[in-house]
Structures are given as C-alpha cells and as structure tokens.
Image (tube, rainbow, N blue to C red):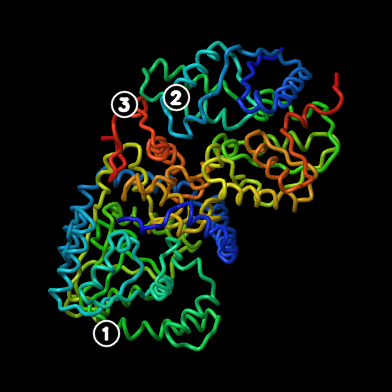
Amino acid sequence: MHTKVSLFIQCLVDSMFPEVGDAMVKVFNRLGVPLEYPEGQTCCGQPAWNSGYREEARAAAHRFVKVFSGADKIVCPSGSCVHMVRNHYPELFADEDLEFRMHVKEIGNRCYEFSEYLTDVLGVVNFGAKFEGDVTYHDSCHLLRGLGIAEQPRKLLRNVEGLRLIEMHDSDVCCGFGGTFSVNYPQISTAMVDEKIDNIVASGAEYVVGCDVSCLMNIRGRMARRGESVKVLHIAEILAAGETRS
Amino acid sequence: MTLQAGRNYREEASKGLDNGCLQKILKKLQNNFGKGAIEYWASMTDSGLRDRAKNTRMETLANLDVVLSTLAENVEKAGGHVYFAKTAEDAVNYCLRVAAKNDVETVVKSKSMTSAEIGLDAALKSSDIEVLETDLGEYIIQLAEDQASHMIAPSIHLNRSQIGRLFEEKLGAAYTDDPAELTRIARKMLRHKMLDADMGITGCNIACAETGRISLVSNEGNIRMVTTMPRVHVALMGLERAAATMDDHQGLLQLLTQGAALQKLSTYVSFAGGKRLAGDPDGPEEFHLVVIDNGRSKILGDNAFREVLACIRCGACLNICPVYGRIGGHAYLSPYSGPVGAVVSPLLFGINQYADLCKGESLCGACLDICPVKIDLPRMFWNCDISWPMVIGNRRRENMTGGKLWCSSCGALV
C-alpha cells in the first residue's frame, strides 16, 4: 500500500497549465497512489523570495508550512518550488525558534519533485506509459543544481514505450527564464532562450520535455513567436500518455 | 569608483548582444574554458581539494588580522615595506609618494584589477608619469583606450583582425592578423620599456604570510621582468588575497591556474617579497606591498557576504555564466565582471549605481558549480536581491528591512 501523497500544485500549473496537474494525478492513479489536495494552498513564496521581498516570501512560506504540516509526502510538478521549500525555507526562517526551524526542515525533507518521487521513493521507472516520438530533455536549473536531479527524468523517459530520447547540446544551460529576470531583462533573457531553442531544434527532436513549467512556458512562448514546430510538454504529460497497464 | 557617466547595464548589455563578433568569441570561450573546468573538477584525483581550499579561505578570513600582520612582519624582515591603505585614495597617494621619492618617470605594470579598482593609472598620468601595461591583453586595452572585459583575458572582446588594425593604427606596424606576429610586435615594443622603467607595479595573486612572499602567475613572462628590472616594485593586493601558510598557498595556486586557464601550473609563477640583497643578480632596490581595504573590511564583517572574499579571481564563473556569455564583460561597468563581479561590485562601489547587477542574473547556479573554492554566489544574489525592490522599484519597503536603509558603500543595512 502506497503512502498518501499530498499534491503541491505550483502557481503556474494551477493558473496556466492545469493539464500538467491532471496528468500527474493520472500517473499516480495508475500506480494506485492515494492522493489528497490540501485546500488553501497558495504560492510557496519563491517569486517574492527571488525578487527580494523577504517578508512577503515569509508570509507565503508560513502558510505553506501550515497547510502542509500534516502531510506525509508532498509532491510537486516543479523542481524550483521544491528547491524553495527544501533549500531556501531554512534560510528564510533562520531567525525563528529551533522547534519551528526543525519543523520546516522536516517538511522540506518530505517534499519531492514529481520525477524524483517516482524513481527515488516509489522506485518505479516503467509503468506502461506509451508515447510515440523523438524527445529531448531540458535540465531546469533549480531542479538540476538545486536538487541534483538529472538522471531520474531521463530514466523515466527511456522507459516509455515508443519514445526515443535524444540529448540536445547544452541541455543544462539556463533557458533564460529566471522568474523575474525574464521580465526585468527581456533582451538578455530572449538571447538565452533563443540559444536554447536553437539547440532543441538542432537535436532533431519533435518534443522538448522538462519538469518545470516555468522554463517550458518560456521556451514555448518563444518557440511560438519563432514559428517552430517542436512541441513542448511537461514530463507528467508524457508519462500519463498511453494505456493503463492494470 | 564611479560609473562612467551615461553608461548603464541595460544599454551596454544590448551592445554586447548586438555584437556578432563578441557573441562568437564568448561562445568559444565558454565552450573551451567553462566546460573544461567543469570536466576537470569532475575528474580530478584529489576530489576534496576544492572543499579544503574553501575551508582554508574561510579560516584565513576569520583570522585575517593575524594573517596580515604575520605577512607584514615577514615582508619587512626581507627588507620590504608594507602599507595598509584604508581607501582607494589612500592607496593611490601612497603609490604617488613612493614614485615621487624615487624620481619615477616611467612605470611598467603587469595585470592588476586592483589598480583599476583604485584608479591608479589616471593618477600616475596626472603626475606626468608614463604608464605602460605589459600584459598583452592589458596592453591591447591600453592602446585601444578601452576597458577590460574579462578578469583573466582583458581583451577577449577583440578578435585578432581588430587587434591587427589597432597595432597598425597605434604602432605603425604592418597589418597582420597572425597571433604569433602580433605578439612579436607587442614584445618588441614592451621589452625595452621594461628594461628602462623606474618602477614596476603588479597585482598579487596570493600573498603567503608564512613566507612573506607574494606570488604572481603569468603565461607571458612579463611579470618576472616587471618585478625584477625596475628599481622599485610596488605590489597591490586587496586585503583578502592572503594565505596563511605555504601549504594553503599551494592548494590555492593549483585551483587558480586550473580555474583560470585549465593549466596544472601557469608558465611562470613569480615570487616577490623583499628588496634585492647583496649577491642577488637582479631585483628591485625597494619593494612595497600595498594592502588595500577599500570597503573589504565591511564585507568581512557581514555574515551574508563574507564568503565573496574567498574568491581567488580565477574568472572561471565568467566562463560558464549564461548571462556573461551573452552580454560580455563591459556591461558590468566594473573591473570585476561576471557573477562574482555582480556580487562584489555593488558591495565595493555602492548598491545604488550597481543596482542592476543585483538582479541581472537568471539565478541558474552554474557559477557555484564551477567555482574552484565553491563560493555560493547564487545565495549571495538572493541576498543582494533584498536591496533592489527599494532601489529599482523606488519603493521603500519598511517591513522588509525593519525601516533600515542600505549603506551605499558596503551594502549593509545601517
């Protein structure tokens, strides 16, 4: 019997890409993982933290800690939000009392990125997903460098029937999104995403896949403006594709 | 130090982005040196060296008063002079006094970012002293009346045909874009100047307290001439450049040359420290070590930013940063560019004029991966960020800083 998973749905998935949340639920249902959606969850506070608004970030983080304090396992379809909870909350709450800091640390340790949870916790890499096509994988910065997740999503993708994984050049270089960076410095950000897209196109893949919709939104938006035909998908959408095994 | 009037990060960044030649150069730089360093760190046999060096750096910073006084003692024992300069102006005035006392008319310099930080060249020139850079990249920059754009390779933004045209125009040399021939032209121009100069000014890569010797790495051999041929040698160092022991020094040297240029050891490592003694075949009659604070002790006292003083100025973070890799070094408007420059420039020169640097990074974290001494620059970007809602948004956020204001000289809350 699987441990119940509390879904931590990041803001961009909630507001712009709900299909990613649906796909994640579909994958968990297929595996028989019991789910709950803690009501009242909001942003983890990352945008405020990244922009220097610490008090505002702390307010959001306090709410997160409260909402998820009873959760066994917390799973989120975004590496950067998990990085925030696991690695930045301790710094954000450095001034709080020891008991609270221990509580925050412990919540961080129970918080997982989706592909990480499937491979490292559930130990499942193949659950009968089918997806026809050539796919290239983009390493999101906070997922890769903040959480050290690189092999897990690739392992999952390699086990999808019909899918061919092609590595692009410089898959680990930033796509230029960087949250508010792309808003504040659009020229630099655009130059960065253009190079990312050049590498995606040069790989010959029909799809680019990642674990963070923020990067994917950035890449997708620029691709659309450039008129590129490569499709952009979150890994959950790939894993949810195909017939259910059981 | 103040920004050049009328120049700002956004405009300079745009110029960099629009410069096709620069884009090609930066791509090549990052593909070779950035990727090379990451591969080397992953494969090095002594996998604990970087962590040990980081600890060494932090320990040295924690005991900096003792380390620096030991250094000074040992330099003085060898007949050298040590001067602790509180500010840039203080350091410049000391150099001018040394020059005046020794009737210096010509100065040859090896590469020193600290000299750019304190504005030494302009001060020497206004005292009618001829100043000549001898590092090839710096010499090119000086001829072009340009600014350095990379910590290790100051003229990286110019390609060989641009340099050929520059030499043609400024030196009257026949145009060539052959790197070997261009180097020969520069060598010929520089050599007699080095032989005839009254004073040599260098930076300092590592100052070893135990031995009282500063070490200088180079691949061109100019440094050994600058430190031995002129009558007077003045070495400039930021006060954080010190290493306590020769053991510490050894590890840092290795990481420095690997991080900077993927070299096990640079072609030359020069050790300097005292004056020429009886029986020495060469060396200066006077040696001065100028230990410069200029805001560093404030950084030292700041828990959030102390770690940035552990930097060994290898420039590796420039070779991987996707932002530096697009915009180049000029946009930073500081002698210190790239990720480490984005942290250190606001701290040294003021948060207000360098506000863009506090949020002009994508927070991708690649600079932490490549740093030989594992400085957590991304963490410091997040800390720098605290300042910008006030500065950029022009909104006072009382609740964010408890009503405190940012000190424009050190970046700390006051």
The residue that label 2 is drawn on is A56
Mark 1 lies on a secondary structure that is helix
Q: Horizontally, is B205 left or right of A22 in the view? A: left
Mark 2 lies on a secondary structure that is helix
Which numbered tag is attached to residue A76? none
The residue that label 3 is drawn on is B402
Image quarter where the C terminus of chain B lies is top left
Chain under label 1?
A: B
Q: Within 10 angstroms of label 3, few (less than 14), some, or many (20 or more) residues?
A: few
Specify which label sits upstream in the sequence, 3 or 1: 1
- Residue B382 percent across, percent down from the top left: 44, 37
- Dividing the picture into quadrants, the one containing residue B202 is bottom left
The residue that label 1 is drawn on is B196
Q: Horizontally, is B178 left or right of B374 in the view? A: right
- Residue at coordinates 62% horizontally, 36% vertically from top-left? A149
Residue A72 vs B252, above or below: the answer is above
Residue B382 vs B194, above or below: the answer is above
Are both tags, 3 and 1, on one chain?
A: yes
Task: Tell me whether circle 3 and circle 1 mark residues in contact (CB < 8 Å).
Answer: no
The Cα atoms of the two marked residues, 2 and 3, are separated by 13 Å
- Residue B204 percent across, percent down from the top left: 31, 62
